[in-house]
């Protein structure tokens, strides 16, 4: 008998992932969708079909066999898990798609398994547009039998590829995710610096962008476009919120410190993210590093 699935949390990434499970997950029963703001869940369900709204976590969990959740930070993850575990979860499978510190992953795994449930960590790489298109990269870790139950909803549904750590501790997935995210923040810092220097030396950002398109297609070109267009400060809702970017940077620096390593590039990027937060508040985006670099160089935050 096919399992009943539930999805908890509808942030920028969660909406797209939830949509693809409902539309392409070969579900025998409608996906149960819960969000703290019920209206957001109702709007998504009306749009995607093959889904139904739960108004409480208890309602969602009690009626599901596999519960996916994707929320913003470590505190929210542990709070969500505590709420989930108020319901009998024995025999159920919980899947965390959030980006958290590996220590948090280990803690939630222990909490969940103590209640007789299984746990899989499944953080993802990709932007919200990739989540919507089912083009994410899923990093999956946990006991083999548990991971096997999650795989039907990853490649070809939520993702274009998997990094499969079946049989390894769940924290392995979030360890890779946190380290992997440092490549993103370092990329944005390097692009920001290049754009500012190109403008101030007279090369011009348009000609620099031509080089980036040819030499670094993909994420570099996409972020370069965001810088040139002013998207880095014009959005009402960030694609990669500054608070989440700083959370990931803190996790990475903490992991490095515990291993006797210093991540100087991440420290530099985080110093710019601090300026983004001070300048743009909660709507600040990781790409706002460009604005912070501009300020440092005597230009306006806005290009």
Image: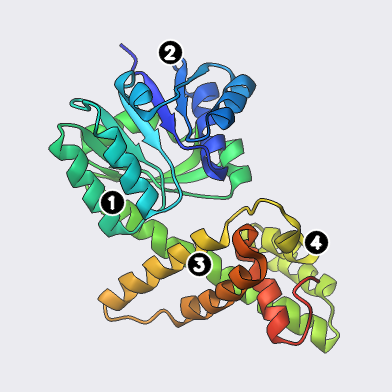
**Of residues 227 and 115, the one drawn nearer to the viewer in this rendering:** 115
- The mark nearer the N terminus, 2 or 1, is 2
Q: Is residue 66 visible?
A: yes
Residue hosting label 3 = 183
- Cα gap from disc 4 to disc 2, whole angstroms: 43 Å
Residue hosting label 4 = 229
- Mark 4 closeness class: few <14, some 14–19, many ≥20 residues within 10 Å: few
Q: Is residue 169 visible?
A: no
Instruction: Please give the name of the residue rendered at 43% of the width and 35% of the height, measured from the top-left corner.
Output: 154
- Cα gap from disc 4 to disc 1, whole angstroms: 37 Å
Which quarter of the image is occupied by the N terminus?
top left
Q: Quadrant of residue 226?
A: bottom right
Instruction: Please give the name of the residue rendered at 17% of the width and 38% of the height, measured from the top-left corner.
Output: 113
* Label 3 element class: helix
Above/below status of 1 relative to 244: above
- The mark nearer the N terminus, 3 or 4, is 3
Q: Quadrant of residue 146?
A: top left
Residue hosting label 2 = 29
- The mark nearer the N terminus, 4 or 2, is 2
Estimate the x, y position of residue 74 in percent, counting from the top left. Answer: 36, 54
Left or right: 255, with 15 as reference point:
left
- Cα gap from disc 2 to disc 1, whole angstroms: 29 Å
């Amino acid at each position: 008998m096919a399992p009943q699935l539930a999805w908890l949390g509808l942030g920028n990434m969660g909406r797209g992932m939830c949509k693809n499970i409902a539309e392409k997950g070969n579900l025998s029963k409608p996906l149960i969708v819960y969000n703290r703001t019920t209206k957001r869940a109702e709007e998504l369900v009306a749009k995607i079909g093959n889904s139904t709204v739960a108004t409480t976590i208890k309602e969602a969990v009690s009626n599901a066999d596999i519960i996916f959740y994707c929320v913003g930070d470590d505190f929210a993850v542990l709070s969500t898990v505590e709420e989930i575990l108020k319901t009998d979860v024995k025999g159920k499978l919980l899947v965390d798609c959030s980006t958290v510190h590996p220590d948090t992953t280990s803690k939630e795994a222990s909490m969940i398994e103590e209640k007789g449930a299984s746990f899989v960590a499944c953080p993802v790489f990709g932007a919200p547009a990739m989540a919507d298109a089912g083009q994410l990269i899923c990093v999956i870790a946990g006991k083999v039998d548990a991971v096997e139950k999650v795989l039907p909803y990853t490649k070809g549904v939520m993702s274009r590829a998997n990094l499969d750590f079946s049989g390894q501790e769940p924290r392995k997935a979030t360890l890779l995710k946190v380290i992997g995210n440092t490549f993103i923040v370092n990329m944005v810092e390097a692009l920001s610096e290049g754009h500012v220097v190109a403008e101030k030396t007279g090369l011009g950002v348009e000609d620099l962008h031509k080089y980036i398109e040819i030499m670094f297609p993909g994420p570099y070109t996409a972020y370069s476009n965001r810088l040139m267009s002013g998207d880095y400060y014009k959005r009402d809702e960030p694609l990669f919120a500054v608070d989440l970017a700083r959370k990931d940077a803190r996790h990475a620096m903490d992991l490095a410190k515990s291993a006797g390593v210093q991540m100087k590039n991440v420290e530099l990027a985080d110093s710019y993210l601090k300026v983004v937060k001070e300048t743009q508040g909660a709507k600040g985006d990781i790409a706002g590093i460009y604005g912070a670099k501009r300020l440092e160089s005597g230009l306006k935050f806005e290009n």
